[in-house]
Image: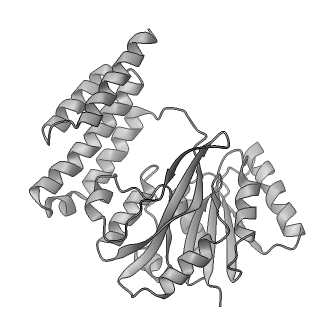
């Protein structure tokens, strides 16, 4: 029986895909299957390059299920495509620019085999890299239920590549919501935490590569936040008053900070004002606001 199905979703120039795939085949746990879902349009350079990399692994007799979308659907849809054919007891997601340490799947599998059915999955510590240099390591991961933090999008699970979960739970939750172009992992975890908890391994077993330094479109961020808060509005309202405030405050500060980074001062001020309706700004938020304003002034 396959113990773990690893689902790699890939889109765009596959610069790190080869190392990503190698990190799966180098795992100490061998009873696994690898499913690669190519979410590129069929007639693009990215599709051609991705096919070339994957075909080289297949020619070397590596066992890969390679699924191709005819056109780009989005990351949530790509994961669902992989989930539909996965046969493992557990599913481990992996973005195409990230990597696993060699014992990642074995240690996650062992933890889950010793856990009861109230535990849906496990996550681990993470190493963050940019330009192949480590700039942050997160090992202080805690087990439990983080519904409030996930609703606020402040739960530090590091990356979608850090989600290792029972296949039965993924099926129960009907996979990922394709409406969400961002916050796909948070959205999934909200539904998971309504019933289950996560175990944690305080050891770095995932490498997250943050190579994209482009600032996100603030209007798209606002749209996703509104969709997120609308979908889970009833759950938020069922929580304690202070938890509700924490959730709304966190989202509005996030929007305000990203607007300020892109010099959209009016939007930034508007969302800082909204945030203050749910609590005062923390010292960290105040400091970041000063820094962003100063940088914007210097760049004029």
Residue 169 at x, y percent in the picture: 43, 79
* Residue 35 in the image: above or below residue 48: below
List the single residue furthest toward the right.
59
User: Front-most of 103 and 185?
Assistant: 103
User: Front-most of 101 and 52?
Assistant: 101
Residue 43 at x, y percent in the picture: 75, 47
Taking the image as drawn, is residue 232 in sight? yes
List the single residue furthest toward the left.
241
Taking the image as drawn, is residue 86 in sight? no
* Residue 242 in the image: above or below residue 235: above
Image quadrant containing the N terminus: bottom right
* Residue 102 in the image: above or below residue 96: below
User: Front-most of 20 and 81?
Assistant: 20
List the single residue furthest toward the bottom.
1
Determine which quarter of the picture holds residue 53: bottom right
Image quadrant containing the C terminus: top left
Determine which quarter of the picture holds residue 59: bottom right
At horizontal 37% and vertical 23% (from top left) the residue drawn is 292
List the single residue furthest toward the top.
300
At horizontal 69% and vertical 83% (from top left) the residue drawn is 31
Residue 295 at x, y percent in the picture: 41, 18
């Amino acid at each position: 029986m396959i113990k773990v199905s690893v689902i790699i979703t890939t889109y765009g120039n596959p610069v790190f895909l080869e190392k990503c795939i190698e990190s799966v085949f180098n795992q100490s746990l061998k009873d696994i299957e690898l499913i690669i879902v190519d979410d590129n349009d069929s007639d693009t350079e990215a599709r051609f390059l991705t096919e070339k990399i994957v075909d080289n692994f297949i020619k070397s007799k590596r066992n890969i299920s390679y699924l191709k979308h005819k056109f780009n659907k989005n990351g949530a849809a790509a994961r669902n495509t992989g989930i539909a054919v996965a046969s493992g007891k557990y599913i481990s997601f992996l973005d195409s620019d990230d990597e696993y340490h060699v014992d990642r799947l074995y240690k996650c599998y062992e933890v889950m085999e010793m856990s009861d059915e109230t535990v849906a999955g496990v996550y681990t510590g993470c190493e963050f890299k940019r330009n192949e240099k480590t700039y942050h390591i997160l090992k202080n991961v805690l087990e439990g239920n983080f519904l409030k933090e996930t609703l606020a999008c402040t739960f530090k699970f590091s990356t979608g590549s850090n989600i290792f979960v029972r296949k039965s739970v993924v099926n129960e939750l009907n996979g990922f919501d394709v409406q969400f172009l961002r916050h796909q992992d948070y959205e999934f975890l909200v539904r998971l935490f309504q019933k289950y908890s996560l175990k944690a391994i305080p050891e770095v077993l995932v490498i997250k590569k943050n190579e994209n330094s482009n600032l996100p479109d603030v209007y798209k961020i606002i749209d996703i936040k509104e969709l997120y808060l609308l979908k889970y509005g009833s759950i938020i309202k069922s929580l304690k008053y202070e938890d509700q405030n924490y959730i709304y405050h966190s989202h509005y500060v996030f929007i305000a900070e990203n607007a300020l980074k892109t010099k959209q001062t009016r939007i930034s001020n508007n969302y800082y004002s909204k945030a203050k309706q749910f609590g005062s700004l923390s010292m960290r938020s105040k400091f970041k606001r000063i820094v962003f304003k100063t940088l914007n002034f210097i760049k004029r």
